[in-house]
Image (cartoon, rainbow, N blue to C red):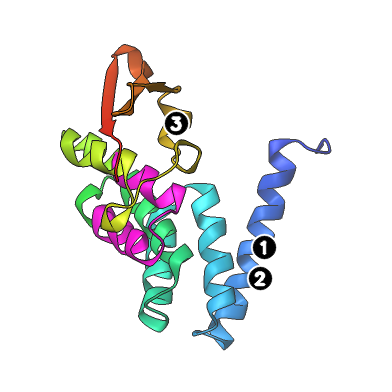
Amino acid sequence: MLIPGSPEKSDVALAKQITALEAELKSRPTDLEVLLRLGKLFHQQGTFQKSIPLFERIIVLRPRHLEAHILLGMDRFHAGRVREAIDSLQRAVELDSLNAEANFYLGLCFLSLDREDEATKVAGTGHGGRTLPPDKSLFTVVFGHVKPAGNAGGELVSNASGSRRVLRFAEQS
């Protein structure tokens, strides 16, 4: 018996949506909306081996599709393809330097590769050296809070996974 709101019910609904969109995609293989909706469902499901090719297809059809670049980067990151994720996310940041999600995941990729200097730069600035206001950076959510460091900028502090990490960034003029 399915209880309203139970995971089983939502899994069934998700499977039905996926089946319908896959059928629709067969008749309209270049429809960006169908590709994006199906990719997002696989993304939501954590089925990255299915979402990644869909986002890649969107980018071939529309190279400046910001959301596809971000989702592709996120899913590549979660699939363990961090270096490829960086390429996608850097392109997203080129398209919108103040996009919080793109900057967050780009910084996360750099941190996962122990490239803390680059992560620090992403935490404090957007593409082209523009300052990111603290509320525009998702690092402020993940890293707890921004501590002012005088007029010199600030630092982001994380206690994630039991290890303390501090990213410092300077005020940009």
- Coordinates of residue 137 in the picture (x, y in percent): 43, 40
What's the CA distance linking mark 2 and mark 1?
5 Å
Q: Which residue is mark 2?
A: 20
Q: Amino acid at mark 1?
A: Gln
Q: Is residue 142 above or below residue 118?
A: above
Query: Quick one: SS at disc 1?
Result: helix
Number of residues whose C-alpha sits closer than 10 Å to that of mark 1, classed few (under 14), some (14–19) or many (20 or more)? some
Q: Is residue 1 above or below residue 40?
A: above
Query: What is the number of the mark on residue 140?
Result: 3
Task: Between residue 118 and residue 40, name the one nearer to us.
Answer: 118
**Badges 2 and 1: C-beta atoms under 8 Å apart?**
yes
Magenta residues, as a range?
Answer: 85-107
Number of residues whose C-alpha sits closer than 10 Å to that of mark 3, classed few (under 14), some (14–19) or many (20 or more)? some
- Coordinates of residue 39 in the picture (x, y in percent): 50, 63
Task: Between residue 30 and residue 161, name the one nearer to us.
Answer: 161
Q: Which residue is mark 1?
A: 17
Q: Residue at x 40, y 25 (%)?
A: 143
**Badges 1 and 3: C-beta atoms under 8 Å apart?**
no
- Coordinates of residue 92 in the picture (x, y in percent): 36, 62
